[in-house]
Amino acid sequence: MAKVVQCAKLGRLLPGLERPPFPGPLGERIFNEVSADGWELWREHQTILINHYALNPADPEDRQLLREQMEEFFFGEGAQMPEGWMPSGAGAAKGGGAPARKK
């Protein structure tokens, strides 16, 4: 049977992750306090951040930015979409391209 956690993101008891998503205190906290469904929401949000700000997950500064955003997403006051982000086809001008990333 899968481990059940009180998901910090979704606010209810749900099946947890099989193992910490990465080493260290934040990975352990996510393992103990975030459901598999909550983690999937982060993966989708992370993709949006990477694409919107043209982040390189191999770059240590970009990885740090993603970890900060991850902590806010799960445990902060509430995650917000990147400034200026709009869903595909929601009236965005053609050929606009992504803005320069914020640091």
Image (spheres, grey):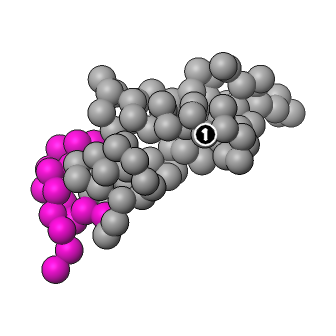
**Quadrant containing the N terminus in the rendered view:** bottom left
| Residue at 44%, 47% in the rendered image | 42
Does 69 sit above or below residue 57?
Answer: above
Q: Is residue 91 magenta?
A: no
Outermost residue, front side: 24
Residue 94 lies in quadrant: top right
Residue highlighted by disc 1: 63
Can residue 31 be seen here?
yes
Local secondary structure at mark 1 = helix
Instruction: Report the side of 10 relative to 66 (left or right).
Output: left
Residue range highlighted in magenta? 1-17
| Residue at 45%, 55% in the rendered image | 22
| Residue at 71%, 47% in the rendered image | 58
Instruction: Report the side of 100 relative to 75 (left or right).
Output: right
Badge 1: few (under 14), some or many (20 or more) residues near its Cα, within 10 Å? some
**Quadrant containing the C terminus in the rendered view:** top right
